[in-house]
Amino acid sequence: MLQADHVSLRLGATPILHDVSLTARSGQLTAIAGPNGSGKTTLLRALTGELAVEGAIAMCGLPVHPRHAMALAPRRGVLPQSARLAFPFTVIEVVRIGHGAGRFADRPDLPLRALDHVGLRHMASRTYQDLSGGEQQRVQLARVLAQIWEPACPDGPNWLFLDEPVSSLDIGHQLSVMRLARDFAARGGGVVAVMHDLNLTSMFADHVVMMQSGRVVAEGTPEAVITSETLSAVYGCDLAVSVPPSGNRPYILPQNARAG
């Protein structure tokens, strides 16, 4: 379990997070959603131990704090919004960076297997900087997967943290990446993903944390959180949420939106 209790954070003189509490469980995909500037990425950086906060965060009983980064590395992999490399690493070398930081560094087959998972084994010897933005994003996902390859271990689950993991991808690869995340959770791992696409959030998330102005304003299943009333209030426009006759998860058609 990942637990945040009364977390607040300032960056300089600016308050970013305000008394945020949430619980994410292994075996589930928890999505953090909300408009631009709502604090989603800052919260994710706090949950991974990149930022020190007021309050307490614990992952499987381990305290989460920047000074514990080395202890946390074998238990959690982090995919940022973007990653820049200053040197001309090959694709396989980038994946091996994550592989070497995890608990499965003694399994030399994993970097190529991770590239198989994202459909990029054939680019293993290519220079990272020569790839498209979407291909680079998939390489970074392979790096994270190689770091925490097994979702569930004898001493507890591993965790996957994703910051807008489909932002540079076409729709086919968006679905592929979300299915990878969903499978990681289904096999006992924990997944926390910052999401902008509300329809993908509804399709794949078990638990949704909706943020606005640095606060959690709604939390629960997609059916409970992704409602016309909540979205219209949070996003500042009149959004209509629909549910198919079959009773599947809610979806949003932006054609129905009207400015608030």
Image: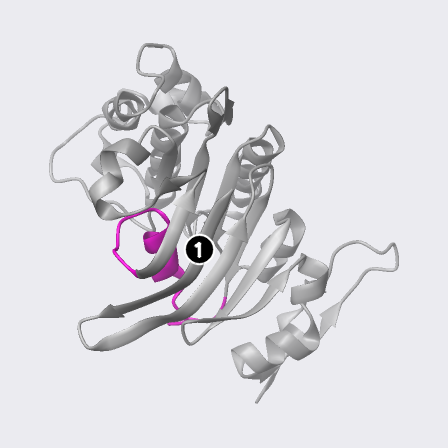
Q: Is residue 67 left or right of residue 42?
A: left
Residue that lies at the very extreme toward the bottom in this rendered image:
260
Residue identifier under label 1: 4
Picture coordinates of residue 186, whole percent (x, y): 62, 33
Q: Residue at x 32, y 10 (%)?
A: 106
Disc tally is 1
Which amino acid type is shown beneath numbered disc 1?
A: Ala
The picture quadrant where one finds residue 19 is bottom left
- Res 112 seen here: yes
Q: Nearer the viewer, residue 70 or 88?
A: 70
The residue located at (45%, 37%) in the rendering is 60
Is 144 within the magenta?
A: no
The single residue placed furthest to the right in the displayed view is 245
Stretch in magenta:
34-53
Question: What colour scheme governs how the chains and residues are painted in the rendered image of this protein?
Answer: one colour
Residue 158 location (% of width, % of height) = 45, 31
Q: Is residue 148 above or below residue 218?
A: above
Badge 1 marks a residue whose secondary structure is: strand
Query: Would residue 163 appear left or right of 127 to someone viewing this image?
Result: right
Q: Nearer the viewer, residue 158 or 222?
A: 158
Tell me the residue at 34%/51% (across/down). Answer: 81
For the residue pair 33 and 216, the one nearer the viewer reads as 216
Q: Residue furthest left?
A: 87
In percent of width and height, residue 168 lies at 41, 50
Q: Magenta stretch: dominant SS?
A: loop
Q: Quadrant of residue 52?
A: bottom left
Give whichever of 252, 236 is nearer the camera. Answer: 236
- How far from the left and from the top, in percent, is residue 243? 79, 63
Does any portion of residue 196 appear in the rendered image?
A: no
Residue sitting at 22 percent across and 25 percent down? 90
